[in-house]
Image: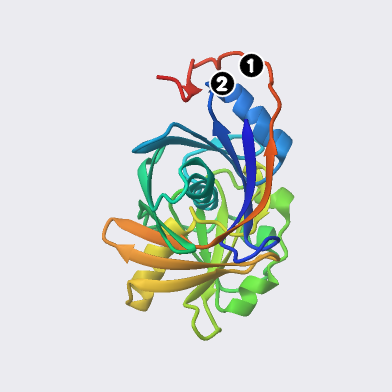
């Protein structure tokens, strides 16, 4: 099985968010996919199968399958349009979050995702300890993830997480901390943490922006935005609020091409196999 590592939301390797992309030609079980993702130990490993109009796509962290991943979708689109179906400019993926479409324009990829506006919620009791922010004023919202709005970009940069405490906040897959940007040409910044699913700090998180885009579009009164994720590797995202959908764009850089040797596999308990009819 061909295996690629693509740095998503990056112009060059060693930036952005690395995603593993496995091109599946023979059906394999979800159990084996999880083992491969755990062995790869990247924040996400994508498994893509099929050809033609629609590909089947699934995403796994080192510990579980998830419903949506932006950077691994971008990485998958890069692999499809450069190696599986060279020159492809439009791609469709069947996923647990429905049909996702990606358009390639030159070196940039634009992903059409569901918009998931967060709702106002009460902050969990352990949140300030988890983020190491002391008495900083917090606004909290939630959808799949907990969205924490802080006073400034410098507050986002200053976060010193306690991952043990953070992992004990059970209601949400991850925690996104965000603020209005100080930098010219950037609208908002964020960082994203998900220790409950084996990812302490994610370098650049496309899926959290399905929540951050509608929030900041409403707060800033604009539909087109530029976002920056302030991890050590960092990344830029081109964002658009489009009704019940969001568009997330970025570039990608190939880091490596490899091959996963044949592995024994047995069907998952639910009998699901990617690539099967």
- Percent position (x, y) of residue 95? 41, 37
Quadrant (top left/top right/bottom left/bottom right) for the C terminus: top left
Q: Residue furthest front?
A: 86
- Percent position (x, y) of residue 151? 55, 77
Quadrant (top left/top right/bottom left/bottom right) for the N terminus: top right
From where the camera sits, is residue 120 visible? no
Q: Which mark is residue 191?
A: none
Element carrying mark 2: strand
Instruction: Decide which of tag 2 and tag 1 comes sooner along the chain.
Output: 2
Circle 1 Cα neighbour tier, 10 Å, few/some/many (<14 / 14–19 / ≥20) = few
**Residue 199 sits above or below residue 269 on the image:** below
Residue at image position (34%, 38%) is 53
Element carrying mark 1: loop
In front: 153, or 62? 62
Residue 138 location, quadrant: bottom right
What residue does disc 2 label? 29
The colour scheme used to paint the residues is rainbow
Residue at image position (57%, 55%) is 175
What residue does disc 1 label? 265
In the picture, measured across the screen, residue 189 lies left or right of residue 160, that is left
- Percent position (x, y) of residue 77? 48, 49
Q: Are marks 2 and 1 in contact (CB under 8 Å)?
A: yes
In whole angstroms, how far apart are the C-alphas of marks 2 and 1?
7 Å
Circle 2 Cα neighbour tier, 10 Å, few/some/many (<14 / 14–19 / ≥20) = many
In the picture, measured across the screen, residue 34 lies left or right of residue 103, that is right
In front: 157, or 252? 252
In front: 30, or 264? 264
**Residue 258 sits above or below residue 222 on the image:** above
Residue at image position (50%, 41%) is 84
In front: 60, or 193? 60
From where the camera sits, is residue 259 visible? yes
């Amino acid at each position: 099985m061909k295996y690629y590592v693509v740095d998503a939301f990056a112009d060059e390797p060693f930036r952005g968010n690395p995603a593993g992309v496995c091109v599946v030609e023979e059906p394999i079980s979800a159990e084996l996919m999880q083992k491969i993702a755990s062995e790869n130990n990247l924040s996400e490993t994508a498994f893509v199968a099929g050809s033609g109009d629609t590909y089947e796509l699934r995403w796994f962290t080192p510990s579980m399958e998830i419903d949506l991943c932006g950077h691994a979708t971008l990485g998958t689109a890069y692999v499809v349009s450069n190696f599986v179906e060279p020159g492809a400019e439009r791609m469709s993926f069947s996923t647990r979050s429905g049909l996702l479409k990606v358009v390639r324009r030159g070196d940039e990829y634009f992903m059409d995702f569901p918009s998931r506006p967060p709702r106002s919620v009460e902050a969990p009791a352990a949140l300030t300890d988890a983020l190491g922010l002391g008495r900083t004023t917090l606004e909290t919202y939630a959808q799949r993830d907990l969205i924490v709005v802080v006073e400034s970009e410098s507050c986002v940069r200053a976060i010193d997480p306690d991952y043990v405490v953070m992992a004990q906040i059970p209601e949400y897959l991850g925690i996104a901390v965000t603020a209005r940007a100080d930098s010219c040409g950037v609208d908002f910044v964020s960082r994203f943490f998900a220790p409950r699913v084996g990812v302490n700090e994610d370098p650049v998180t496309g899926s959290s922006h399905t929540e951050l885009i509608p929030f900041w579009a409403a707060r800033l009164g604009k539909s087109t935005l530029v976002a920056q994720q302030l991890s050590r590797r960092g990344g830029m995202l081109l964002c658009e609020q489009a009704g019940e959908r969001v568009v997330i764009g970025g570039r990608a850089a190939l880091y490596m091409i490899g091959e996963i040797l044949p592995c024994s596999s047995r069907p998952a308990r639910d009998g699901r196999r990617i690539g099967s009819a």
